[in-house]
Image: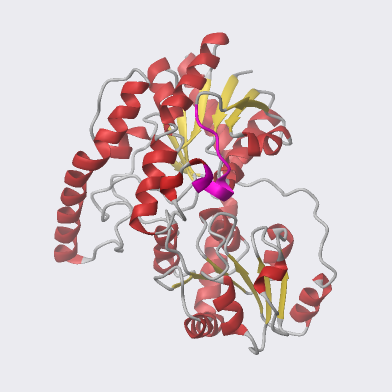
Amino acid sequence: MARIIVASMPFAGHVGAMTAVAGELADRGHEVLAYTGAKYERRFLAVGAQWLPWQRATDFDDSDLAATFPAVGDGKGLRGGMANVEHVLIGTGAGQAADLLAEASRKPVDLLVTDHLAFGAALAGQTLGLPWASVAVTPLSMESRDLPPPGFPALPAKGALGRARDRALRAMVQAMSGRLLDPMLNRMRAAAGLPPATGGMEGLFSPHLVLAQGVPGLEYPRSDLPSYVHFVGRLAVAPPPQELPPWWTEIEKARADGLPVVHVTQGTLDVDLTDLLRPALAGLAGERLLVVCTTGGAPVADLGPLPENVRAAPFLPHDRLLPLTDLMVTNGGWGGVLAAVQAGVPLVVAGASLDKPEVARRVAWSGVGRNLHTGRPGAARIRRAVRDVLAQPDTARRTRELGLKLAAAGGAAAAADLLEELIADQAA
C-alpha cells in the first residue's frame, strides 16, 4: 500500500472534498496523512487519516481570516479578494512546501494529492519530482481557448465576434497577471527554493492528474481539455449523525401537503446575515411555501423575529434536508451547489466573493437555476427569482438530469481509482 499525503487548505468547503478523497484512500488500506490546519484535524481523523499539522505555514481559522491576515478584512470586493490571494493562498505557500518537504525527508511519500489552492503542495510535488494530483475544489479554473479568462464576468462566447472578444480578454488578463500575479507567485517559489516561472496559477495545477468536481453539462465545454483532467462528480462524505430540530416534521408535512420547501443558506464562510439571509426571509415572508434557513453557525436569534413560514437552525444535514427541498437559495459555495444539483434541487444563486460568481454563472448557463448577479440582492428580487424558478418545470427537469450524471460520475471512488492508477504508472 502507498504512503499518501492529502493536502487541504483549512476552509470548510475545501475540507469537505478532501476528506472524501482521504477517507476513500484510507478505506483501501493506504497510509494517508492529512496536511491541514488544526481546526479540521478531527474531520480527517474521523475518516481514517492521520493528521500532519501546519507548522511552518501560518495556520488560521477560516471563520475569522482577518484575525490572522488583517489585510483581508471582510474578504469582499476586489481588494478583499486580492488580499486573500496574496496573504492566504500565496502567503502560506512557502511554509506549506517546507512542511511537506520535511515530512517527505523524514519518511518517503508515494503520492501527493492536493487541493488545487494549496499552492505549497504543488511546489513540494515539483521539488520532489513525485507524481502529484490536483483536486479542483472550485469550478475548474484552467484556461481554455474556448472560454473567457477564469474569473472574468462573462459566459463562453458565441460566434466569431464573441471568440475574438475572449481572445482579447485572455491576452489582457495574461498581461496583467505577468505584472501583478507572477511576481507574487515567484516570491513564493523562491522561498520554496524553486526557480521563477510565468503563466500565473495555471502552473500550479498538476500535469499528471486533475480531479475536477462536477460533470460536463454543469461545466463549460472545452475542446482543449487536457487528457489528464477527469470529472469525478461530487466529492463529499456523509455527515455525522445530527440531532434534528423539533420542527423537522413540519418539512415532511409540507411535502406531503404539496407546499414548496425552500432552503436558504450562506454556507460557512461568508456569513454576514445582511447579505442574503435577512433579505431572503423578508422577501419570502407570507409566500405560500415553507422556508428552511441555516445560519452557518450564527445563533438563530441573530436573525431577529422570524416570519411565520420560516424555520431556522445553525446547521442542518444536507443529506436529510435536500431530498425534501424544492429549491435552494444560496450564495454559491461549489460544494453546496453540487449537493443541491445531485439531489435534483434547482437553485437561486447570489454570489459575489471568491469563486462564487463563477458558480452562479455556471448555474444559469447549465439551466439548473437563476443567477442574481450580486451578493446582496433585495427582498423583492429574491422573491421574484424564487417564484420564477419554482414555476419552471424545465429547470427542475434539467437539474434532475445533471443530478443523475453527478451521481454516476463516481465521486470519491472514481477519484481513488484514478489516483491508484497514477501510483501504478509511476511504479511501472
Above or below 74: residue 262: below
Q: Residue at x 72, y 70 (%)?
A: 301
* Relative side of 187 to 286, left or right: left
Above or below 361: residue 229: above
Name which quarter of the figure residue 374 lies in. Answer: bottom left
Q: Residue at x 56, y 46 (%)?
A: 62
Q: Position of residue 237 (x, y in %)?
A: 67, 45
Way the structure is coloured: secondary structure
Residue lying at the far right in this picture: please name it.
246
195 or 239, which lies in front? Answer: 195
* Relative side of 97 to 13, left or right: left
Look at the image and say whether residue 66 sits in the magenta stretch. yes
Q: Position of residue 140 (x, y in %)?
A: 40, 48
Look at the image and say whether residue 147 sits in the magenta stretch. no
Above or below 177: residue 95: above
The N terminus sits in image quarter: top right
Q: Position of residue 387 (x, y in %)?
A: 54, 85
Q: Residue at x 45, y 23 (%)?
A: 97
State which region is magenta.
57-67
Q: Position of residue 346 (x, y in %)?
A: 55, 71
Q: Residue at x 31, y 63 (%)?
A: 155
Q: Is residue 394 visible?
A: yes
Name which quarter of the figure residue 245 lies in. Answer: bottom right
